Image: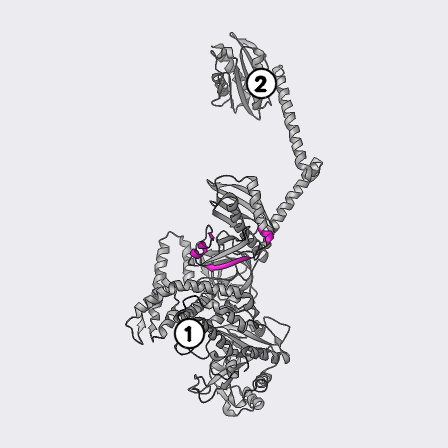
Amino acid sequence: MTSTNDLRRSFLDYFGANGHQIVPSAPLVPQNDPTLMFVNAGMVPFKNVFTGLETRPYSIATSPQKCVRAGGKHNDLDNVGYTARHHTFFEMLGNFSFGDYFKEQAITHAWTLLTKEWGLPADKLTATVYHTDDQAFELWKKIAGLPDYRIIRIATKDNFWAMGSDGPCGPCSEIFYDHGEHIAGGPPGSPDEDGDRFVEIWNLVFMQFVQEADQIVGDLPRPSIDTGMGLERIAAVMQGVSDNYDTDTFKALIAASGALTHTATTGDNQASHRVIADHLRCSGFLVADGVLPANEGRGYVLRRIMRRAMRHAHLLGSKEPLMHRLVPALVAEMGAAYPELVRAQPLIEATLRQEETRFRQTLDKGLRLLDEATAGMGEGDTLAGETAFKLYDTFGFPYDLTEDALRAQGLQVDRAGFDSAMAEQKRAARAAWKGSGAKASDELWFDLVEEVGATEFTGYTSESGEGVVLALVKDGQRVDRAAPGEQVDMIVNQTPFYGESGGQVGDAGTLSSESGLAATVTDTSKQLGKLFVHHAWVDAGELKVGDTVRLAIDVARRGAIRANHSATHLLHEALRERLGTHVAQKGSLVAPDRLRFDVSHSSAMAPAELADVEAAVNAQIRRNGTVETRLMTPDEAISMGAMALFGEKYGDEVRVVSMGTGDDGQTYSIELCGGTHAAALGDIGVFKVIGESAVSSGVRRVEALTGEAARQYLSARDEKLREAAATLRTTPDEVPARVAALLDERRRLERELAEAKKALALGGGAKDAAGPEMVGDVSFMAQVLEGFEAKGLRGAVDDARQQLGSGVVAIVAVNDGKATIAVGVTPDLIARFSAVDLVKLGVQALGGQGGGGRPDMAQGGGPEAGKANEAIAAVRSALAGA
């Protein structure tokens, strides 16, 4: 028996030996067609080559392409498990000519491989051609020797291919295999063509025309070939079976499912095992290509596929999560051909286990509600749409899962009623929003969310990509286009640009298109938590709704933002370790050039504490641990020790970011976070705290730099240190000692200067020095000292009192436009005079208020330094009037 893996290899070897470049499968997420949710045909990765937008170093190629059809118009999900040939995931083998060979060689290759290399009997094969393609008809007769009745002309679009309403197009030629009279069905084009007897195994597309608005307008300058052979179908033919699920790969996966559930794989269980096997392949490959379960976009389709398989595991009586235990069987069957499965096996298993564990928690409740709602219903009856909506809204049952659950009972679902309940919920949500006090200008974004849906963010794994322009907004109004020089807000269906939220600033970058558009995205915001709004300036060309645009973020800027964001997580944990678990985030800013982090803490951090925190963060950076991200419910995340971050709004699913390793061997930081992060902590480079300050009562702010910004900061500080050393005529290492010595010298000189000024003042050399005088029967000494520091006044007054023996001293110090007066009274006169009362009189004369001290010594000041003599006079008058 020829295995599926042998067939894949044989196909590639044949075309490789005939000069074709063997091209590995592209990822399932399209890189060049934003209108597609998943790659759904073998030619999708070559689309731009066929249209001339891209050139490659080869003109003929062959590939095994992974494909998924489970969303949009290419949706086979409902039929999977119940027919012989429907799959969500399948492989398409193809050979391609980009302006090299055409119909004759394509037919020759197909016939040679099928009949001579693989030995299929010629009498089992039938070809179809487009009804006007006489050339292909004659080539089949010439090359294959097929009789006229086995070359069937088809007049429908089934045998005419087009890339779209505009672009390359051309007739097709399909090859069918006849399984034999024992299977029901007729040849293509007959009334019984939908049976399983005749199965299409290969489609040859002859691209030879150009069309505009669905009308052929000319010939392609370089006719090309695109072919597609379903590997699962040809494997069934080569292995002598008429059912894809009876081929070796599926049989192995179904056998593993049967063994783990301890159930038969035939009879009533057959459809469930087939669903599990198919959806296991689809889920595994999607996760390996970077898609994770979510509530929007591709992630939502993946979740539907996973949950459909998990419901069938439940039907089989599996009491514990099943899907993740089947991953080793999948890797064993397909890992050699697709090494990404091997690399991603731990992630695939963890994702499936987590998703099934979560789903099982609500599955029983949902099925009980479904059983209650359908009790008494008979075959052909219809379940109310409101009930189906309750299952969807309350228990997370997708609509198609409810349909699938009722199929076995012969029941239907009221789709119109489901849609009506969904519309009513949206109406109620809008009414609640209008009554919430939200800004009126936000209503535009609310309208757009309802119209175009949420933006799918691809930036966790991509730095560029394509998107379709869904809406343009200028000056608060929707517009259809924007010209050069205009600023416009743009919404696309999918984007790698992060919208500002959770403290992380939005991405910047560029937009472009094949029509000549060039635009600069200066910022990206997030509206209503769902719409990513690109704020762009059009530099050249015209930006229009409906355009396909290439989006490229500023990679260097994003890298710096990622480093700073991961650093805030490390900083948070380091602060908690050093200051205590009371520390909680109160705000943050993650920008490309800096970060700041606000935390609850009652007092300023000591330099030693900041040094310890900085050292702890840098220790984690040096260990260069990976940064891991998982999806889970908020409750699950918090139960495993994750911390919720300030400013984030959490739904029923969160991203949990883990990084670093503590001294105890446990994960250093686990936090709920929707932002972008470094892949490894070493990418941060270095972490440097540059400031710590108060924000408000009980909240402190730490400011820091990482990477190149930190290096530049440290380099600038080093240069300043060198400049200081040069000024001081010493080395940088000796600067602290040299500065300390200079400060000691300065303090000594200041003391000497103060003593000299005091001595000068007491010696009569000061301005207006009058020496002791008699005021009444009291000896009075008064002086005004220019440039004398107020802190030396008390000492000067004390010295003067000692010289007097008995009397009153008043000295005014004038410095920097201000005046300070001090009054001293010797002990024998305290009963008659209070220094406090006397100094207040002087302070009033100086334009001040108050003044205080003790009865023997008091001091005060005022702003009017020019009235120093008036202050002395006021004290003298008080003594004279006593």
Q: Label 2, on which residue?
A: 796
- On the image, which quarter does residue 185 sit in? bottom left
User: Which SS class for mark 1?
Assistant: loop
Indicate which disc residue 338 carries.
Answer: none
Residue that lies at the very extreme toward the right in this rendered image: 729
850 in relation to 308, above or below: above
Residue found at x 42% / y 62%: 358
The answer to whether residue 446 is above or below residue 63 is above
Q: Nearer the viewer, residue 106 or 739?
A: 739
Q: Residues within 10 Å of mark 2 (few under 14, many from 20)?
A: many
Q: Residue at x 71, y 37 (%)?
A: 730
Amino acid tagged 1? Thr
Quadrant hosting residue 227: bottom right
The residue carrying mark 1 is: 263
Compared with 577, 45 (above or below) is below
* Range covered by the magenta-colored residues: 620-647
Q: Position of residue 317 (x, y in %)?
A: 39, 70
